Image (cartoon, grey):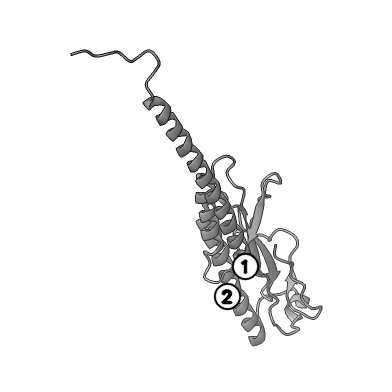
């Protein structure tokens, strides 16, 4: 999971612990994964933006005008917000039915708006019970989803590696099942080819 942002006390940016207020950016994830299902968290890293201690706008309670320094902060926040949303959208889109709703961590900018600076997307990593072939296909999807963003995070790569290992286990299970099935079919074929008792007759010229 992504750790919450802990900006310095002098930072202009304050993390939001409540839902985003009306007028803020859309796309807040609110779904809670089923605790009975194994899930992994895919997502962009939370970042602490390097900003100066600019608190004048918040102190005044007005966003009618911002300083050039604050405009730079807003531009940086907007860029980060786009990056985070693209990152999580890539996970969710590629993960399809196995991916949950993206969750975002927000910071309020000097313009009073909420900007996403980190995020996670839960994804189901359970093998399909009794069906190694379906497990293989599922883990391939999980791996693609984990590596879908342009710059996968360390957590994304860890999920991809876990899915790859689970896929390898499923392939081994499938080979064992196929070998057992082939042996059973060969045994049945051998029995079928044997002459049944009492089925032989003598032929005379």
Circle 2 is placed at which residue position? 79
In the rendered image, the residue lying farthest to the bottom is 68
The one nearer the camera, 116 or 184, is 184
Residue 89: x %, y % from top left: 54, 61
Residue 178: x %, y % from top left: 48, 42
Q: Quadrant of residue 40?
A: bottom right
The one nearer the camera, 107 or 204, is 204
Whichever of labels 2 and 1 marks the residue nearer the N terminus, that label is: 1
Question: Where 105 falls versus 171 (above or below)?
Answer: below
Q: Residue at x 70, y 65 (%)?
A: 2
Can see residue 203? yes
Q: Quadrant of residue 70?
A: bottom right
**Total marks placed:** 2
Q: CA distance from mark 2 to mark 1?
A: 14 Å
Q: Residue at x 61, y 79 (%)?
A: 76
Q: Quadrant of residue 203?
A: top left
- Mark 2 vs mark 1: in front: 1
**The N terminus sits in image quarter:** bottom right
Element on which disc 1 rests: loop
Q: Residue at x 57, y 44 (%)?
A: 128
Question: Where 191 falls versus 175 (above or below)?
Answer: above
Q: Is residue 182 shown left or right of residue 53?
A: left
In the rendered image, the residue lying farthest to the right is 9
Question: Where 167 falls versus 12 (above or below)?
Answer: above
Density class for disc 1 (Cα within 10 Å; few <14, some 14-19, many ≥20) is many
Circle 1 is placed at which residue position? 44
């Amino acid at each position: 999971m992504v750790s919450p942002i802990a900006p310095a006390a002098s930072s202009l940016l304050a993390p939001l612990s409540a839902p985003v207020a009306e007028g803020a950016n859309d796309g807040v994830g609110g779904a809670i994964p089923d605790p009975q299902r194994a899930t992994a968290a895919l997502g962009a890293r939370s970042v602490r933006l390097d900003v100066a201690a600019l608190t004048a706008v918040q102190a005044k309670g007005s966003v009618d005008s911002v300083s050039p320094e604050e405009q730079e902060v807003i531009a940086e926040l907007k860029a980060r917000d786009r990056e985070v949303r693209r990152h999580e959208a890539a996970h969710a889109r590629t993960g399809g039915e196995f991916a949950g709703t993206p969750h975002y961590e927000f910071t309020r900018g000097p313009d009073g708006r909420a900007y996403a600076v980190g995020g996670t997307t839960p994804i189901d990593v359970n093998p399909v019970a009794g069906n190694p072939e379906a497990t293989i296909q599922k883990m391939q999807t999980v791996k693609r989803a984990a590596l879908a963003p342009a710059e996968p995070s360390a957590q994304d790569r860890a999920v991809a590696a876990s899915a790859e290992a689970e896929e390898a286990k499923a392939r081994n299970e499938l080979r064992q099942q196929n070998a057992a099935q082939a042996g059973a079919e060969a045994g049945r074929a051998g029995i079928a080819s044997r002459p049944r008792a009492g089925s032989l007759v003598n032929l005379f010229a």
